Image (cartoon, rainbow, N blue to C red):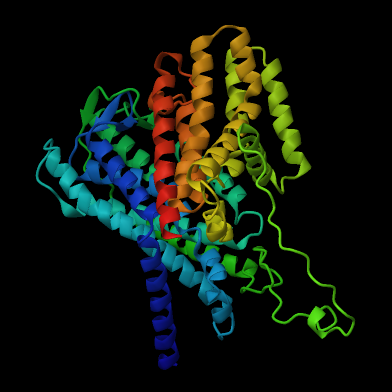
Amino acid sequence: MNHGINHSLRVLYHMVKADFLERVRSYSFLVILAGALYLAYSVIAEKVWVLVGDGYRGVYNSAWIGMLMAICCSTFLSLCGFYIVKNSVERDSKTRVGRILAATPMRKEFYTVAKTVSNFAVLACMVLVLMMAAVTMQWLRPEARPISLWKLWSPFLLISLPAMFVTGSLALLFETLPVLRGGVGNVIYFFVWTFGLAAGVESSVEDPAGIRILETSTRQALERMNPGGGKNSAFSLTIGGEHASRTFLWNGVDWTPQVVAWRLEWVAAGLGLALLASVFFHRFDPARESIRETKVKEKPNAVDDPALRHEPQSKPGPATLTPLGPRGHSRFGRLVVSELSLMVKGLRWWWYVVAAGLLVAEFVSPTRQAREGVLLAAWLWPILLWSQMGCRESRHATQSLIFSAERVLYRQLAALWAAGVVVALVTGAGTGIRLLVSLDWQAAAAWLAGALFIPSLALALGVWSGSSKLFEALYTVWWYMGPLHQLPSLDFVGGSRASSSPGGYLILAACLLLASCLGRRRQVAYA
């Protein structure tokens, strides 16, 4: 029995190690890690705030810095980290490793638990880096001394790590569900994540991110400092916005056995999700896999083989090549139409109905606020069309075919970008036309800059990452924080009039196009 347990642990270790090494070498891992480190810096630079009561924040001691960085870590990585680790089952399927695993006596439950642990290992690595960064952050912010490693690191251990385990198990569960394993699931998870954060702030439910623990502990500290002042007070986690006007001393969460048990319950919940995923896991059955594979016949049918037929064969005619056709803009236009038809291929009728409804709503919206709200929905609806830009060749393994075409670096890439711009212009045409009719040139310029920026971002991320997930994740977060909440620096639609910068986004779109060309040149060189 001990031999069987040791063998299972060795198999689990090697599966986790292989997945971990594969993921930490990717560009997306480095990008998300850099974003997490920047968020940690934002805590010390007073760009990220937790306001408690009537404009209070904690003194920057080890407890406050550790808790604030752990909360930012659990919220940020539970969103962006989800898109990093949500590819383990898909990768095994594409590389045919799953077929080998399916031939072994490995149980489905063992496989899903192993994949969950490997997802957690990748996210826990990022948490470990942030724990090291927390020491540097307190050293750079000498508001309180000395540095207490337990107060600084305990929030990471008891809040961030359980949240990462839940995130890893949710990523695996989404991969095993037919509807949620693709781009639709990537968008749906963002709203699930948003609902989970809102529930932690506005209700008394214990949340995986630990917001409820921080709120309860800080209010108790305010109540002790000022009896009656900590009750019925506001609590908010904000990026930018209003700064704190007063400080109070907070010495950290009282990690009682009950609080620790609450956090361990989330680990048990993540394990339950991993076991639930095994119910939907198809064990790489070719008849149930969602990825359509082209089946190549190993041997032609004898009846259909002309070489084996007894009737005489006609002599083949002279070989001819298909003419390239006239050069010029008409040829480029047909290439744009071809890219556009590839982009919308496979869409169901209801997709067009929703897009048409949003377009009509842009024309008939009575107020500017309502029109901007409809435009936000209209520019989120085609996210799965834009996300395939630049990575379609990698997804379908057609690099050698596409990259061998004439002037592929500029003509095909420009046609692909133009097709994405057409999607943005058509879906947002109602708002653009009304802005032009009303002679609102500033808003019209912001609308045009947004229509050029979105496909530029999709193309650059698709070319460099080779996947659609990075754009789906980044654009959804950008859309939520910028245009939806009108955060000045991220509002590419121009809803916040005082801070809309069409020129800045036009320059950014041009830079993204340049990055796309450099990335495609690199792909062509190594194809």
Q: Please say whether residue 162 is visible from this viewpoint.
A: yes
Foreground: 412 or 515?
412
Q: Quadrant of residue 94?
A: bottom right
Q: Please say whether residue 197 is visible from this viewpoint.
A: no
Vertical arrangement, residue 271 with respect to residue 514, above or below: below
Foreground: 352 or 157?
352
Could you tell me residue 48's position as x and y percent?
31, 33
Residue shown at 45%/42% (left/top)? Answer: 460
Could you tell me residue 191's position as x and y percent?
55, 42
Vertical arrangement, residue 359 with respect to residue 420, above or below: above
Could you tell me residue 46's position as x and y percent?
25, 31
Q: Quadrant of residue 334?
A: top right
Taking the image as shown, residue 499 lies to the left or right of residue 224, namely: right
Q: Quadrant of residue 311?
A: bottom right
Foreground: 419 or 317?
317
Residue shown at 18%/43% (left/top)? Answer: 137
Foreground: 320 or 280?
320
Taking the image as shown, residue 185 lies to the left or right of residue 325, namely: left
Could you tell me residue 368's position as x and y percent?
59, 13
Taking the image as shown, residue 302 lies to the left or right of residue 122, namely: right
For the N terminus, give its image quadrant.
bottom left
Looking at this view, name the residue that lies furthest to the top: 439
Residue shown at 53%/22% (left/top)? Answer: 448
